[in-house]
Image: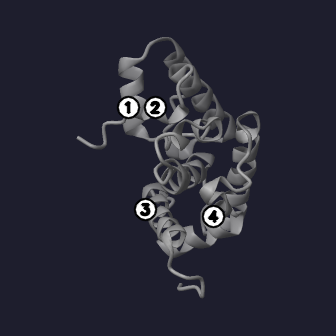
Amino acid sequence: MLTNKPYDFEEHVHRFAIWAASRAASVVGQRFPVRDGRRIIEAVGLRNLIGMRGFPEPSQFDHHHLAWREEVITRADFPFELSHGVAAKLINCYLKAAVVLASNSRAANDPRVAAIHPPVDRLLLSSIRKNCGGATARLPETPWSKFNSSEYQATIEALKEIAGNRPLWTVEEHWRGHH
């Protein structure tokens, strides 16, 4: 779907972020095409966050994330119900590409960017379980793509503990999908 909007850097980032998020979040049993990912992302208003316009403060991020997940699930309109894990993956991958990676290194440490949840998947969770003690005991055993809201939030709380004072995106140092 082409728009009348000029193809500028923001549009370029938005299109890539839609593709990346839709491909990453589409899993067995909950598959959907990129065009549906785009429809959902745009309906939820995530595009408005590019450039940090209207971005929630860190203390409000989890509250906004829950509202976004619930809206993604409602707007999905698929023959299956999206889990909170899949809805979160769509949101998190979009924000990672559109906000975190589109930022410069100073902006990536902005407290609002530092609060963005990392994309959660099996590779990240298994590596964290293997390499990080303490907080990992609270990680749910449920596969990420089946997380309900409380399992997803418990995972984020454990990841915050692992990140400590560093931006939350830094826990992705444990992600092994690049090998």
Q: What residue type is labelled 4?
A: Arg
Q: In this view, does 20 lie above or below 59?
A: below
Residue 130 in the image: state x and y as whole percent.
Answer: 36, 20
* 4 and 1 marks in contact (CB < 8 Å): no
Label 3 CA crowd tier, 10 Å (few <14, some 14–19, many 20+): some
- Which residue is the site of mark 2? 170
Mark 4 lies on a secondary structure that is: helix
* Quadrant that contains the C terminus: top left
Residue 77 seen in the figure: no
**Within the image, what quadrant is residue 78 found in?**
bottom right
Q: In this view, does 153 lie above or below 13?
A: above
Q: Which of marks 3 and 4 is in front?
A: 4
Q: How many numbered discs? A: 4
Q: Which residue is drawn at 65% across and 60% down?
A: 46
Between the residue at mark 3 and the residue at mark 4, the CA separation in whole angstroms equals 17 Å
Mark 2 lies on a secondary structure that is: helix
Q: Residue at x 54, y 32 (%)?
A: 168
Which mark is first along the chain, 2 or 3?
Answer: 3
Q: Which of marks 3 and 2 is in front?
A: 2
Between the residue at mark 1 and the residue at mark 2, the CA separation in whole angstroms equals 6 Å
Residue found at the very far top of the displayed protein: 134
Q: What residue type is labelled 1?
A: Glu
- Which residue is the site of mark 3? 23
* 1 and 3 marks in contact (CB < 8 Å): no
- Which residue is the site of mark 4? 47
